[in-house]
């Protein structure tokens, strides 16, 4: 934040964090689309609360990168080139399976990603 100046806002999204310590009820189990929609809604709220913002960047790790990519698609205005009304600067992801994971996992784990008790719809959308 020191390099960005006093008007910079660093926001760590909360909408896709687990609310209870139960791996079967994690919010990421309802899919990339639902998690991305939650993230887009949270970004809109943050932008609304901070009207002085001019620029926006996204950083996402693993499934968070997929949520960020989906949210950007919802927030992008093709007429203005703006994201949530702000000038986009950076989109960065780390360890994000943008091309999916189906061919990279052992057969024993296929059941979990195909809607088994642990992954739900979130695993199937990978």
Image: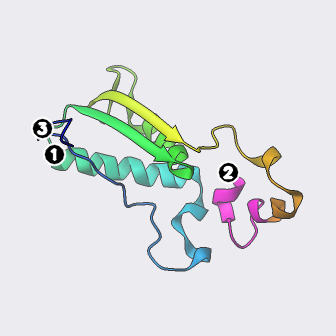
The answer to whether residue 38 is visible is yes
The answer to whether residue 85 is visible is no
- Mark 2 = which residue? 125
* Above/below status of 115 relative to 34: below
Would residue 120 be counted in the magenta stretch? yes
* Above/below status of 60 relative to 72: below
Name the residue furthest front.
Answer: 2
- Seen from the viewer's position, the closer of residues 94 and 122 is 94
- Mark 1 = which residue? 50
Residue 17, quarter of the rendered image: bottom left
**Mark 1 and 3 residues: CB-CB less than 8 Å, in contact?**
yes
Magenta stretch, residue numbers: 112-126
Q: Residues within 10 Å of mark 1 (few under 14, many from 20)?
A: few
What percent of the width, then of the height, locates residue 122?
63, 58
Name the residue: 70% across, 43% down.
Answer: 100
Q: State the CA–CA distance, disc 3 to disc 2.
A: 36 Å
Name the residue furthest bottom.
Answer: 21
Q: Is residue 80 left or right of residue 124?
A: left
Q: Residues within 10 Å of mark 2 (few under 14, many from 20)?
A: some
Which one is earlier in the sequence, the residue at label 2 or at label 1?
Answer: 1
Name the residue: 36% across, 51% down.
Answer: 41
Q: Secondary structure at mark 1?
A: loop
Q: How many marks?
A: 3
* Above/below status of 58 relative to 89: below
Q: Residues within 10 Å of mark 3 (few under 14, many from 20)?
A: few
The disc at residue 52 is 3
What percent of the width, then of the height, locates residue 88?
33, 28
Name the residue: 36% across, 55% down.
Answer: 13
């Amino acid at each position: 934040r020191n390099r960005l100046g006093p008007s910079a806002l660093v926001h760590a999204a909360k909408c896709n964090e687990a609310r209870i310590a139960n791996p079967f009820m994690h919010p990421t189990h309802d899919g990339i689309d639902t998690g991305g929609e939650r993230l887009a809604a949270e970004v809109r709220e943050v932008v609304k609360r901070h009207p002085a913002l001019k620029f926006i960047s996204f950083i996402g790790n693993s499934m968070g990168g997929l949520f960020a990519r989906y949210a950007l698609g919802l927030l992008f205005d093709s007429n203005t080139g703006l994201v949530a009304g702000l000038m986009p600067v950076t989109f960065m992801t780390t360890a994000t399976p943008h091309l999916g994971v189906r061919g990279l996992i052992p057969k024993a784990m296929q059941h979990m990603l195909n809607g088994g008790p642990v992954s739900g719809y979130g695993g199937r959308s990978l």
